[in-house]
Image (spheres, rainbow, N blue to C red):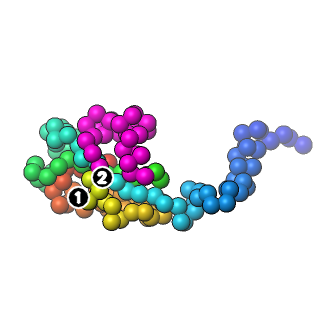
Amino acid sequence: MPRKSRALERRTLKKFQIPAPGRKTAASPSAAHNVYVIRLDGVVGDWLKAKKLNPNRNPNLPCVYVGMTGLAPEERFANHKAGVKAAAVVKYHGQKLLPELFAHLNPMPYDVAVVMERELAEDLRAAGYTVFGGK
């Protein structure tokens, strides 16, 4: 009888592990995910990439980055600034969170957050913001 590879065995066993009581998993529909908006330094609005992504941008509105996370938005912003899974534009040009643009939307399940990230970016772009992120 052929032996299973250890990697396959670990992956298979991991699938059947039961989370500790009260602990949420990524697959859990009640898992709290958040969208967030970070204000960026205005200098990024002059980048060619910004102009291509945001042809109808209003230079009087701030440049922003839209993202989604399973962390608290404040913790995710700190991670960006520390370079942990960071978008370079946020690491070097991120200024602060703009909760007035996202706080009313949070929290939400993962699958909703994936769609909301994209829709929020599109809505802000349509309103004239210079938007990065929001895949």
Q: Amino acid at mark 2?
A: Val
In terms of image quadrants, where is residue 10? top right
Q: Residues within 10 Å of mark 2 (few under 14, many from 20)?
A: many
Q: Amino acid at mark 1?
A: Leu
SS for callout 1: helix
In terms of image quadrants, where is residue 9? top right
- Which of these two is toward me, 12 or 86? 86
Q: Residue 40: horizontal and vertical position, in percent?
A: 23, 43
- Which of these two is toward me, 119 or 21? 21
The answer to whether residue 73 is magenta is yes
Q: Which residues are magenta?
A: 72-97
Q: Residue 132: horizontal and vertical position, in percent?
A: 27, 47
- Which of these two is toward me, 72 or 18? 72
Q: Residues within 10 Å of mark 1 (few under 14, many from 20)?
A: some
Residue 39 in sight = yes
Residue at image mark 2 = 37
Residue 63 appears left or right of 65: left
